[in-house]
Image (cartoon, helix red, strand yellow):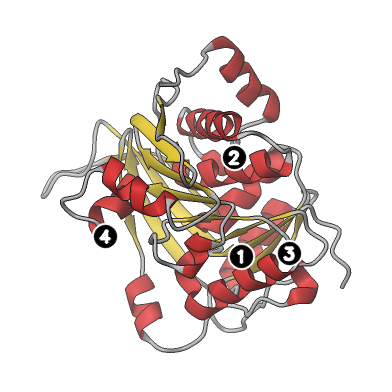
């Protein structure tokens, strides 16, 4: 099938059960009131697709196999949107991969069966194919599917398609050839315990010609390319309603920046603004950032570069 989508996305595509609590986060042996709850598309790739569509970008999704319940959610949600579902593999007699997230402001707790799924040794995702990627202008690749994630990256490299990835170690092949690798504070803390963000970024920037970024929630982001001094940016200050999807939205913002030829400072600022808009509302899939909202936030509440 000829690909007319601007962006190819490979990775986790789920249905997410989200619960926004009233009156604070869960406490042992205490009752909690659910303020809002939804079943909507999720996963790193599913959320990025939703955000990119809202920004006016056409995307093609590939990755997780889709069960019956998840298929219903995806098909209903993406009907009429610029999100191509034609590559998805649908399973019968299986509800599909879902997760459950409890949220209260800055705090959230995801639950699922991903450790069991990955430990099963069984395939539950597609193998990327060159014919499905060629024709797009930019890609985003989740690192979770091992050799198949690397295969997607190789296809992109061979066809001169820049790609964004997330949470990849500095010595990985995915990081080495990425146009952008955005690493979260959680990933950095887990994989490089005892190291400062500056030390981690120095390792990252020397192993790639792409842009290396470390995001740190409400604290300043660090970013640089090989041979450059580390730059910093404070995130946009907004009233946080839910942080669910913040990182996936940041990734989508990086994709949009690449697609539109943004310089590094502009790309980081745009991705940060996308994420800021995202965390100011709930649920994200029903209220994704619009381009006008993002550009207006940048215009009126300019981030500070160091």
Residue bearing the label numbered 1: 10
Q: Residue at x 48, y 35 (%)?
A: 282
Residue bearing the label numbered 4: 191
Task: Report the mark closest to the observer, 4 or 2.
Answer: 4
- Nearest to N terminus: mark 3 or mark 4: 3
Looking at the rendered structure, the secondary structure element under dot 2 is: helix
CA distance separating discs 4 and 1: 23 Å
CA distance separating discs 3 and 4: 34 Å
CA distance separating discs 4 and 2: 25 Å
Q: Residue at x 62, y 59 (%)?
A: 73
296 relative to 302 in the view: left or right: right
- Residue furthest to the bottom: 121
Q: In which quadrant is the C terminus drawn?
A: top left
- Nearest to N terminus: mark 3 or mark 1: 1
Quick check: marks 4 and 1 in contact, CB under 8 Å? no
- Residue furthest to the front: 227
* Image x and y of residue 145, in percent: 49, 74
The quadrant holding residue 90 is bottom right
Residue bearing the label numbered 3: 85
Residue 196 position (above or below residue 300): below
The label on residue 253 is 2
261 relative to 275 in the view: left or right: right
Dot 1 crowding, Cα within 10 Å, few <14, some 14–19, many 20+? many
- Nearest to N terminus: mark 2 or mark 3: 3
Dot 2 crowding, Cα within 10 Å, few <14, some 14–19, many 20+? many
């Amino acid at each position: 099938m000829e690909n007319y989508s601007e962006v190819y996305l490979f990775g986790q595509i789920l249905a997410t059960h989200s619960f926004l609590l009233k009156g604070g986060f869960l406490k042992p042996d205490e009752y909690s009131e659910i303020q809002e709850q939804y079943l909507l598309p999720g996963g790193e790739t599913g959320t990025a697709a939703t955000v990119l569509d809202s920004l006016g970008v056409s995307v093609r999704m590939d990755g997780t196999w889709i069960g019956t319940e998840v298929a219903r959610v995806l098909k209903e949600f993406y009907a009429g949107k610029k999100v191509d579902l034609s590559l998805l593999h649908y399973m019968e007699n299986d509800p599909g991969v879902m997760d459950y997230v409890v949220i209260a402001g800055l705090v959230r707790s995801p639950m699922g069966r991903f450790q069991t799924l990955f430990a099963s040794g069984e395939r539950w995702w597609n193998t990327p194919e060159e014919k499905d990627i060629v024709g797009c202008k930019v890609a985003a690749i989740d690192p979770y599917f091992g050799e198949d994630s690397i295969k997607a990256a190789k296809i992109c490299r061979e066809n001169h398609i820049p790609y964004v990835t997330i949470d990849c170690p500095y010595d990985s092949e995915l990081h080495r050839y990425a146009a952008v690798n955005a690493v979260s504070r959680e990933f950095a803390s887990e994989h490089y315990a005892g190291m400062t963000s500056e030390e981690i970024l120095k390792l990252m920037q020397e192993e790639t010609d792409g842009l290396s970024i470390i995001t740190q929630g409400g604290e300043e982001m660090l970013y640089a390319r090989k041979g450059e001094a580390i730059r910093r940016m404070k995130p946009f200050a907004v009233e946080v309603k839910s942080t669910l999807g913040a990182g996936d939205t940041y990734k989508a913002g990086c994709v949009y920046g690449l697609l539109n030829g943004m310089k590094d400072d502009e790309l980081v600022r745009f991705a940060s603004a996308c994420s800021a808009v995202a965390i100011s509302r709930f649920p994200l899939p029903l209220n994704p950032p619009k381009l006008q909202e993002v550009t207006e936030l940048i215009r009126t509440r300019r981030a500070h570069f160091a």
